[in-house]
Image (cartoon, rainbow, N blue to C red):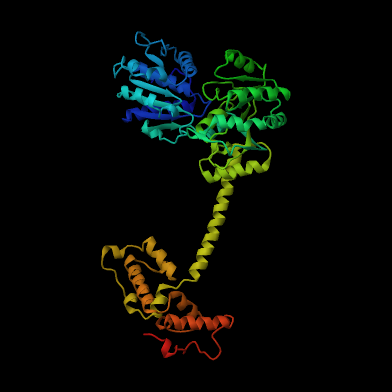
Amino acid sequence: MNAHISMRPYQQAGREKIHAEWDAGRRSTLLVLPTGTGKTIVMAAVAEDQVLAGQRVLILAHRGELLDQASDKILNATGLRCAVEKAEQSCLDSYYRITVGSVQSLMRPQRLAQFPPDHFGTILIDEAHHAITDGYRRILDHFPGAHVLGVTATPDRGDMRNLGEVFDSLAYEYKLTQAIRDGYLCKIMAQTLPLNLDISTVGMSGGDWAVQGLGTALDPYLDQIAEQMAAYCKGRKTVVFLPLIKTSQKFRDTLNAHGFAAAEVNGQSPDRAEVLADFAAGKYNVLCNSMLLTEGWDCPPVDCIVVLRPTKVRSLYSQMVGRGTRVFPGKKDLLLLDFLWLTDRHELCRPADLICEDHEVAQKMTETLAETGCPEDIEEAAAQASEDVVAQREEALAKQLAEQRRKRAKLVDPLQYEMSIQAEDLSGYVPSFGWEMGPPTGKQAAMLEKAGINPEGIDTAGKAAKLLDRLDKRRGEGLTTPKQIRCLERYGFRHVGTWSFEAARHMIDRIAAAGWRGAPKGVNPATYVPPVSEFLM
């Protein structure tokens, strides 16, 4: 592998792991790096490695801006120029060994048919969480012998289809929290604002909330949101994500009315490049957009993100927040404003979903952030939430164990039960068959406990089976239950196991009527025998 590209330790580690996966015979593998940690540098290094190994390399992306970025970064990092496969541009007559290709163009059957199946030896997929779609799959199937690398910051997809359908392994993952600790990304401070935005009536589309409905639901709150931002965002370089172009434009005007210098860009903006440049230069302090800037746009000074496009898709949420996680001189942290969305659905992504893998911890962190009312370091908040959840689990476990001990204290010891019912065959039981020698099954233990027998005193499945048979037989014969035996023997009665159910019930009723203070007056428990009419052998 060529080593002249300047790489951070985790980038080099990812590069080596990718080659190790291919060398081990796995055709396709994934690299997961958080937004802002230089995944394109790793792609450039791997592309150069493969070119030096004599292969042609295809880099796929679903947007033109991503292709241009990849081409520029590969040139800057390696000195290698790229051919382009997009619209009217073709790489077939180019002598460049690396091609950046548009999925929308290359997926077309007639265009794909121009390439022999072995034309590309390696395929690199930028933003690989999109690779599950039919267009990517068609291209990958056309080049069956190519090594495949998918690079993404967010390996899960909103439609929950498994990326394992495309990729054979995860070569390397560098987590957001580690990148922050290592100083490659800035600290994220989450601020939950006490403004309830009702989206409970918004429908779903493609596995997420329908943008048209979100725009309509959001409109009545724009002025209140601007007021909140005036309190928290002044002095910060802010990007706001909104669901619709018209909502984005309306919010720009609202912000300007509240004293901000706000601009707006969307996919139809003819002056988009100029507006982005002006925002970077400081002419504007807020940039509104309708989901245009989720991928492929970098502006490191951004230090505030406002997500007004609620989503249940973690990859989309992470991409939005990732626009503000890059480090920059003088930048202290990223402020992530989080609103309280009123919805009857619970899949809404919140700051906790950026770093919490445990759902219970994420819920606890979300609750805590809503209660504190001030910016919180998400890593510290997650650590505290984890401690709180562990403490809650330990407390719940202690209560559960205490309850179990209380329940078990009411159960009859099996040996005591055998002696009480004078069951010598059970006392002297020795298992004969293999299944009998194993421990009692969970079902057997549950049935014994329900019947009033402590299953912990039974060693084998065979003994449990015989005891359950005996319990069933005694029920049919109308004899005492284990719970009756335990209750009466506590008051000193003997051989209760030979009594009838009705005789035992009658005596327990008498003891209860006397206030559970002891055996009824005139009854000696040590010698008492039920009347013959109630006594069964």
Number of numbered discs on residues: 0
Residue 114 position within the rendered picture, expressed as x and y whole percent measured from the top left: 31, 14
Q: Is residue 152 left or right of residue 329?
A: left
User: Of 399 and 136, which appears nearest the observer?
Assistant: 136
Q: Is residue 372 above or below residue 474?
A: above
Residue 501 screen position, x and y as percent:
43, 80
- The answer to whether residue 182 of the structure is visible from this angle is no
Can residue 198 be seen here? The reply is: yes
Q: Quadrant of residue 229?
A: top right
Measured as percent of width and height from the top left, residue 485 is found at 45, 78
Quarter of the C terminus within the rendering: bottom left
Which quadrant of the view contains residue 60?
top left
- The furthest residue to the left: 433
Q: Residue at x 43, y 75 (%)?
A: 482
Q: In this rendering, would 353 be left or right of 149?
A: right
Residue 371, compared with residue 456, is above or below; it is: above
Q: Position of residue 19 (x, y in %)?
A: 37, 26
Where's the N terminus, which quadrant?
Answer: top left
258 and 492: which is toward the camera: 258
Query: In the rendered image, which quarter is residue 165 located in?
Result: top left
- Residue placed farthest to the bottom in the image? 522
